[in-house]
Amino acid sequence: MEYVSLYTRQHENSLFELETKGQITNKKIYVKLHLLDIAPFFLDRYDLFVKMAEERIKRSEGEDYPIWCSVSKYNCLKPIEKQVVYALKVPKDQVIYFDGAKWDLVLNNQYIPRDQADKRDFQKLLQKNGIKHTFDIFDRKYTGAFDDVKERIVNSWERIFEIDDRSIFKVQANLWKIEKTWVKKIIRPGDDFFKELEDFQDTWLE
């Protein structure tokens, strides 16, 4: 079985779940507590991500949302107060890779073009409908309006899984869970991050 290196920063409470249950999962309540007043918008997008991701790797009961991971220790979020970083070795067939820059477009209700020609074609569609920005057309007040534009935008979001740029600053990874056996290092606030991981090799670009 082929394993890959991943890194993820999680709340220190996850350590208890790891010890007692032998794994870490991401629950809806965790996301709500983290996002607070902006949770409704992001949960709508996360639910869509879950639907698309599950077409690639099935989740099990209790795995509400995926766990966001970095593919490199060089752009991983570092440990801070009440947060730890897990350095993982994960079976490759459990990893859902995606383009983080394209995901940002999803969060902003933007179209993900297939190529430059497709981008120009979509711009013509916006001009035809008198639309300058696509973010607002998903508001409730536009229900029933611009349906063809909205459908084309939403259908384009599957392209987050098409990785055109293999940069460690764009590629991200998701897991439905973290098994205890996958955890090879736990880096805490105050630890020498790169010294702790000096023998831990990134694998994404291999």
Image (cartoon, rainbow, N blue to C red):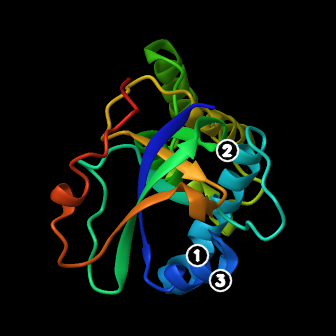
Residue at the spot 72% in from the left edge and 40% down from the top edge:
151
Count of numbered circles in the view = 3
Residue at the spot 66% in from the left edge and 39% down from the top edge:
149
Residue 99: which numbered mark, if any?
A: none
Foreground pick, 75 / 127: 75
Q: Position of residue 59 (x, y in %)?
A: 78, 54
Q: Where, by quadrant of the figure, is residue 57 drawn?
A: top right
Return the residue at label 3: 20
Position of 177 with respect to 199 (left or right) is right
Q: Name the outermost residue toward the right.
A: 61
Foreground pick, 161 / 96: 96
Marks 2/3: CA–CA distance: 44 Å
Position of 191 with respect to 39 (left or right) is left
Return the residue at label 2: 150
Q: Quadrant of the C terminus?
A: top left
- Looking at the rendered structure, the kind of residue marked 2 is Lys
Position of 28 with respect to 103 (left or right) is right
- Looking at the rendered structure, the kind of residue marked 1 is Leu
Q: Where, by quadrant of the figure, is residue 185 drawn?
A: bottom left
Q: Name the outermost residue toward the top.
A: 117
Q: Position of residue 39 (x, y in %)?
A: 57, 77
Q: Secondary structure at mark 1?
A: helix
| Within-10-Å neighbours for mark 1: few <14, some 14–19, many 20+ | some
Q: Position of residue 17 (x, y in %)?
A: 61, 81
